[in-house]
Image (tube, helix red, strand yellow):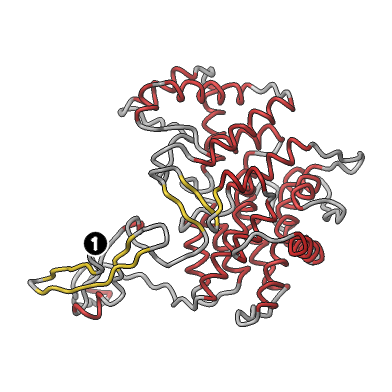
């Protein structure tokens, strides 16, 4: 294959170099296109064919169903590592040794106290406010309590900002849920692991001892790992483009949380449960809704099946399906919503229409089932997604700043009015 690509514009030919990634992905480097052609640009709505950066963090092959963090297969990480190990690897490039992991966890715990004035900001929200809006606001508010900018030339300053964020966000997540439920707000228990602490902070009752359930701990650990990064998606690209203006880490992460809120992105797992609720209210007939999903004239859409990137089975769904079965089996939950979910899953896996189109249940489908079984309110599902995605966002922000990437500034093709004569107000 040639190492250049040739474009012909108005009879003139222009050559552009090809860039090849370590997994043999090929890109045409067009950064000199506009300057070299007198103003010609490409247009790619949604950036589906445009690489915004070179990155060493995550490799995703949707055709083959492959997902790797820093070269490690997602299957190995979910089976053999815990969330903090994966977070460390995403951010710093290598899996930690025992001493590095212990220091990382100790430093996170040391930074996990949140200024009490943040409670006043939280209390200013109505209890009915959507948790994603609350979390985004509280994350942005952290900047007010940590006003100094991160010195990106200092590894120590970068590290301190990272452990601070990893320590404080779980507190804000737990507070957001407990505020909604009218429960007292607390802090972490330094005797517990990172994921164990998340569960305790969210669910402990003030009048009884909290007992850890290892099945739930393992399931949440896997969910957080599976959501930890996913290449240049909407929220990750948002974090990078906001950070490219040299906005701080907290502000950039807050922007990513807002991007994740949308139902086409992180809000999909909430949309799955809302769909299941609607099916239940209509009698719970799964066969009826499978038929509606196959009818092109019917506006109903089956949420939680298929994926815009994976054209095969979502590798994360294979892992989390097993965890979902374990959680439901351990808790012995009897819930008509979960029964409807299992019915849809079983039918989709054998229905020729879905199998032929590879519309398999995805990670959003199973994560919603697990969170519901755990007792997490449906409005909190996307917040849990954000908690898992946190190390990926941090890793992407850190990489972007360390590579000294330029400020993001997409171009456009103007399709509005040409120059018009201005008319005074009394003549319009």
Relative depth, front residue between 171 and 10? 10
Task: Quickly name the residue at label 1.
Answer: 1
- The part of the image, by quadrant, that contains residue 98 is bottom right
Relative depth, front residue between 275 and 331? 331
Which quadrant: the C terminus?
Answer: bottom left
Q: In this view, does 122 lie above or below 347?
A: below
Q: In this view, does 370 lie to the left or right of 422?
A: right
Which quadrant: the N terminus?
Answer: bottom left
Q: Is residue 287 above or below residue 81?
A: above
Give percent across and percent down for residue 22: 42, 61
Q: Can residue 120 be seen in this view?
A: no
Mark 1 is surrounded, within 10 Å at the Cα level, by few (under 14), some (14 to 19) or many (20 or more) other residues, namely few
Give percent across and percent down for residue 271: 52, 38
Relative depth, front residue between 332 and 411? 332
Q: What element does badge 1 sit on?
A: loop
Q: Which residue is drawn at 50% across and 24% down?
A: 344
Q: Can residue 172 be seen in this view?
A: yes
Q: Which residue is drawn at 68% across and 80% down?
A: 148
Q: Is residue 350 above or below residue 308?
A: above
Q: Residue at x 51, y 25 (%)?
A: 345
Give percent across and percent down for residue 323: 64, 34
Q: In this view, does 262 lie to the left or right of 3?
A: right
Give percent across and percent down for residue 11: 7, 72
Q: In this view, does 119 lie to the left or right of 161?
A: right
Mark count: 1
Q: Is residue 49 left or right of residue 71?
A: left
Q: Which residue is drawn at 89% across and 44% down?
A: 206
């Amino acid at each position: 294959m040639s190492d250049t690509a040739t474009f012909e514009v108005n009879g003139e030919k222009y050559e552009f170099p090809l860039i090849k990634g370590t997994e043999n992905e090929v890109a045409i480097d067009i950064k000199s296109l506009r300057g070299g052609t007198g103003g010609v640009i490409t247009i790619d709505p949604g950036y589906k064919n445009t690489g915004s950066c070179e990155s060493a963090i995550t490799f995703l092959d949707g055709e083959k169903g492959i997902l790797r963090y820093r070269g490690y297969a997602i299957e190995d990480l979910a089976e053999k590592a815990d969330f903090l190990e994966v977070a460390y690897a995403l951010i710093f490039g290598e899996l930690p040794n025992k001493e590095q992991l212990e220091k990382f966890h100790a430093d996170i715990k040391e930074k996990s106290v949140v200024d009490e004035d943040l409670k006043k900001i939280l209390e200013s929200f109505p209890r009915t406010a959507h948790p994603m809006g609350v979390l985004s606001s509280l994350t942005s508010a952290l900047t007010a309590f940590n006003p100094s900018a991160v010195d990106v030339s200092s590894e120590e300053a970068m590290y301190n900002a990272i452990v601070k964020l990893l320590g404080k966000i779980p507190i804000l997540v737990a507070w957001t849920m407990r505020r909604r439920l009218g429960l007292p707000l607390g802090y972490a228990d330094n005797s517990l692991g990172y994921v164990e602490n998340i569960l305790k902070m969210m669910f402990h009752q003030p009048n009884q001892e909290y007992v850890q359930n290892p099945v739930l701990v393992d399931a949440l650990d896997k969910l957080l790992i599976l959501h930890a990064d996913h290449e240049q998606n909407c929220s990750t690209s948002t974090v990078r483009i906001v950070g490219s203006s040299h906005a701080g880490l907290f502000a950039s992460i807050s922007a990513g949380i807002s991007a994740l809120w949308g139902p086409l992105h992180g809000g999909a797992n909430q949309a799955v449960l809302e769909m299941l609720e609607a099916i239940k209210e209509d009698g719970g007939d799964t066969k009826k809704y499978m038929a509606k999903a196959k009818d092109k004239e019917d506006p109903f859409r089956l949420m939680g099946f298929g994926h815009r990137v994976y054209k095969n089975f979502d590798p994360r769904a294979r892992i989390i399906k097993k965890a979902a079965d374990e959680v439901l089996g351990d808790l012995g939950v009897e819930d008509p919503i979960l029964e409807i979910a299992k019915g849809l899953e079983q039918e989709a896996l054998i229905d020729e229409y879905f199998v032929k189109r590879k519309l398999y249940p995805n990670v959003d489908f199973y994560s919603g089932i697990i969170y519901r079984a755990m007792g997490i309110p449906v409005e909190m599902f996307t917040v849990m997604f954000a908690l898992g995605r946190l190390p990926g966002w941090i890793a992407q922000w850190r990489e972007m700043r360390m590579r000294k990437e330029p400020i993001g500034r997409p171009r456009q093709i103007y399709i509005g009015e040409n120059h018009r004569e201005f008319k005074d107000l009394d003549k319009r």
